[in-house]
Image: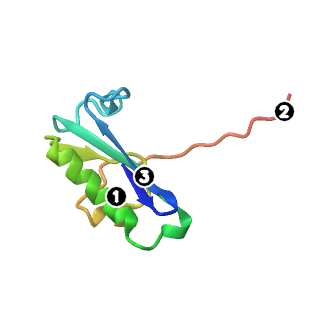
């Protein structure tokens, strides 16, 4: 989904369906309701942030998934728990990010 303004594309929301090229069930094979969907990432240009466009993209994406018979939706890898919580999402998994510095030579 794209957010178009007179200046061009100002935001986007990626949707994934059960039959998409990169199916999400390879990562979450047992926990997803059938048929499942994924929403995200959502992005809004810096000059359009704070105007509610991200919420509209999220709501529009959820309606699009629902209208096509999707039973549930997963949003993977986010720290925006309050934002997504307003739309009924709840946390079910946490990730730890690990780093290692690799020395030259």
Crowdedness near tag 2: few (<14), some (14–19) or many (≥20) residues, C-alpha within 10 Å = few
Q: Earlier in the sequence, mark 3 or mark 2?
A: 3
Residue at left 52%, top 62%?
7
Residue 5 at x, y = what percent?
45, 62
How many numbered discs, if any? 3
In front of the other: label 2 or label 1? 1
Asked if the residues shown at circle 3 and circle 1 are in contact, with their CB atoms under 8 angstroms apart, the answer is: yes
| Residue name at image x 39 percent, y 65 percent | 53
Q: Are marks 2 and 1 in contact (CB under 8 Å)?
A: no
SS under mark 2 = loop
Q: Which sits earlier in the primary sequence, circle 2 or circle 1?
A: 1
Q: CA distance from mark 3 to mark 1?
A: 7 Å
* Residue under pointer 2: 104
Q: Position of residue 9 (x, y in %)?
A: 48, 55
User: Which residue corresponds to mark 3?
Assistant: 12
Q: Secondary structure at mark 3?
A: strand
Q: Residue at x 49, y 68 (%)?
A: 48
Taking depth in this image into account, of 51 and 87 the one nearest to the observer is 51
Residue 83 falls in which quadrant of the image? bottom left
**Image mark for residue 57:** 1
Residue 42: x and y in percent read 42, 53
- Measured in 3D between alpha carbons, the distance from the residue under mark 3 to the one under mark 2, in whole angstroms, is 39 Å
| Residue 82, image x, y percentages | 35, 66
Residue 25 occupies quadrant: top left
């Amino acid at each position: 989904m794209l957010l178009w303004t007179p200046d061009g594309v100002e935001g986007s929301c990626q949707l994934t369906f059960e039959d998409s090229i990169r199916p999400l069930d390879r990562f979450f094979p047992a926990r997803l309701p059938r048929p499942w969907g994924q929403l995200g990432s959502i992005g809004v240009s810096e000059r359009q942030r704070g105007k509610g466009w991200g919420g509209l993209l999220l709501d529009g994406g959820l309606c699009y998934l629902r209208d096509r018979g999707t039973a549930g939706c997963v949003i993977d890898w986010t720290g925006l728990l309050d934002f997504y919580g307003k739309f009924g999402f709840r946390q079910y998994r946490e990730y730890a990010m690990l780093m290692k510095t690799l020395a030259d030579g």
